Amino acid sequence: MTDERRIRIIVNPVSGRGSRRAALRRLVARLTEAGCDVDLHVTTAADDALRLARDSPPGTRAVIVAGGDGTVREAANGLAGRDTPLAILPGGTENLVARYFGCDGDPGRTAEAVLSDRRAALDVGSANGRMFLVVAGFGFDAEVVERVHAGRRGHISHASYYLPLFRTLASHRYGAMRVEAEGEVLCDEPALVFLGNLPRYALGLRVARDARCDDGMLDVCIFRCDGRARLIAHAWRTVWRRHVGGPGVIYRRARQVAVTASRPTPYELDGDIAGVVWHGAAELENKRLPVDGFSSRRQSAVEWTPRVEFSVRRAALRLCVP
């Protein structure tokens, strides 16, 4: 039974700036005025948002995340399959989930979304059991993400990506990616691989251009790519949303997808590094082969796997929408 008064708020202080903190204070004030019992928690380490969302008391009316896409993804991991809905007060750089559903960061509208009965059902992707809401990416983009976070000093802006992007463009090595969808081999050659649950991606790109969050499918976009020239050509067509059906691009929908790689390749989920995939990972003992863009300290801290298996849970998450 839902307790109409109980609200849990999960705050990521790293993704917040002064204006975001002021918005959070207004949100708490608005909910308190409406008679809600607000339970506020601040994250201090990875997976805190997952734990706090998962451990929210039974009957909680909503869990609100004040943070970016990474914090939203963590909280979704703790709420998927439950009746408790998720609400978002966006505070990150891209805020892809929030923008897609029209959550604009206005505390009054966020409070209204929580207090009303407007709910959207959202599919949740799963990568070796780890859930994501927007996109999974292998290779080049994951290497950029790793470089950005390795040099992070507080809030990330779009400018934070410029230097890591050019460094990765100069040094990235293109290994063969084997992608199987519903048992069919789509690719087994050098490529960039994306799986999308939502069409939005960083910098406004629509890599998974036709993705829908409520169709029970993942959109698989594979760019055959073995060097900088082809990468730049793919990027240019993607900016203009002309990549689907273009040369060297494979685009499919599937419920079950598996990915492995000929060399150690990082992959990201919703803008956070999730691990390294490599066909020989099961036999690797010390897990210290070189990984592009990783320091030795960072690469030893992520999970190595010989294969990443993707699936999708249809309508597994409820979202408060304005």
Image (spheres, helix red, strand yellow):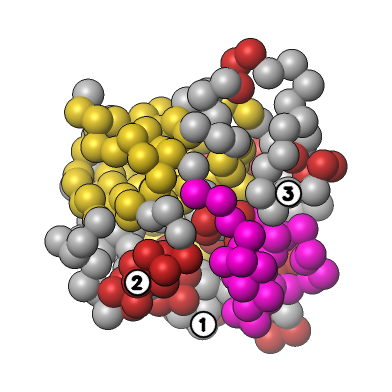
Q: SS for tag 2?
A: helix
Q: Residue at x 24, y 67 (%)?
A: 243
Q: Residue at x 34, y 67 (%)?
A: 234
- Residue 233 is marked as 2
Residue at the bottom extreme of this rendering: 19
Position of residue 318 in the picture relative to residue 181 (left or right): right
Kindly identify which residue carries mark 3: 294
Q: Is residue 202 above or below residue 4?
A: below
Kindly identify which residue carries mark 1: 106
- Under mark 3, the amino acid is Phe
Say which quarter of the image contains residue 301.
top right
- Range of residues picked out in magenta: 146-174
- Under mark 1, the amino acid is Asp
Q: Residue at x 68, y 42 (%)?
A: 291
Q: Answer whether residue 173 is visible to the viewer in this image.
A: yes
Position of residue 245 in the picture relative to residue 97 (left or right): left
* Between marks 1 and 2 in the image, the one whose residue lies nearer the viewer: 2
Depth check, front residue: 239 or 197: 239
